[in-house]
Image (cartoon, grey):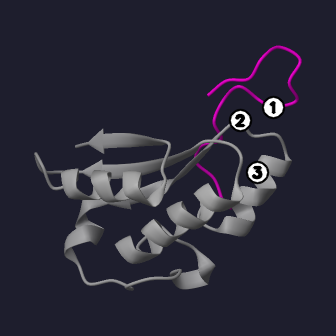
Amino acid sequence: MGRTAGSRRDLRPWGPGPGRGSLDGLLRLEAAGAGAVVLPSLFEEDLVEAGPAAGVGPGGQAGYGAGPGAYLALVSAARAALSIPVVASLNGVSRGGWVRYGSLLEQAGADALELNIY
């Protein structure tokens, strides 16, 4: 994910913070020199609860309770629009509850997957 010496890009992915749940925010991070972006986490609890089927959630954001459809849409849109790696993030609580969505995130275009298991 890093760049060669002399690159204007930061070698670290940009992690938690506002702006990562919208395509506009991700584009701003890339323009500011991010070497990669880590999306907000999709929680396993959100996968079992009914949520928005597609598009974006409250406040134009994916993640933070917007539902899996909105999250997959953001991954796909980010991959199409950005030239830097897009890292999806899943928080799981069961042994395999996250496996299906890991595959869906890969199909949506995520370059990598951050997995947090509690």
Calculate the distance from the C-alpha at mark 3 to the C-alpha at mark 1.
Answer: 11 Å
Q: Quadrant of residue 54?
A: bottom left
SS for dot 1: loop
Residue positioned 24% across, 51% down in the render: 92
Against 12, is 85 above or below?
Answer: below
Looking at the rendered image, the quarter that the C terminus falls into is top left
Against 58, is 96 above or below?
Answer: above
Tell me where the magenta segment starts and ends, as one range.
1-19
Against 9, is 94 above or below?
Answer: below
Q: Is residue 39 left or right of residue 98?
A: right
Does the magenta stretch mainly form a helix, a strand or a loop?
Answer: loop
Numbered label attached to residue 9: 1
User: Could you tell which of marks 3 and 1 lies nearer the N-terminus?
Assistant: 1
User: Could you tell which of marks 2 and 3 lies nearer the N-terminus?
Assistant: 3
Identify residue type, mark 2. Gly
**Marks 2 and 1 close (CB-CB < 8 Å):** yes
Which residue position is annotated with label 2?
Answer: 35
Residue 75 % position (x, y): 52, 61
> Quick one: 84 or 117, which is closer to the camera?
84
Identify residue type, mark 3. Leu
User: Could you tell which of marks 2 and 1 lies nearer the N-terminus?
Assistant: 1
Which residue position is annotated with label 3?
Answer: 29
Res. 116 visible in picture: yes
Residue 52 % position (x, y): 39, 85
Calculate the distance from the C-alpha at mark 2 to the C-alpha at mark 3.
Answer: 9 Å
Residue 96 % position (x, y): 12, 49
Residue positioned 50% across, 43% down in the render: 111
Q: Is residue 87 left or right of residue 24?
A: left
**Marks 3 and 1 close (CB-CB < 8 Å):** no
Residue 71 % position (x, y): 45, 68
> Quick one: 76 or 48, which is closer to the camera?
76
> Crowding near pointer 3: few (<14 within 10 Å), some, many (20+)?
some
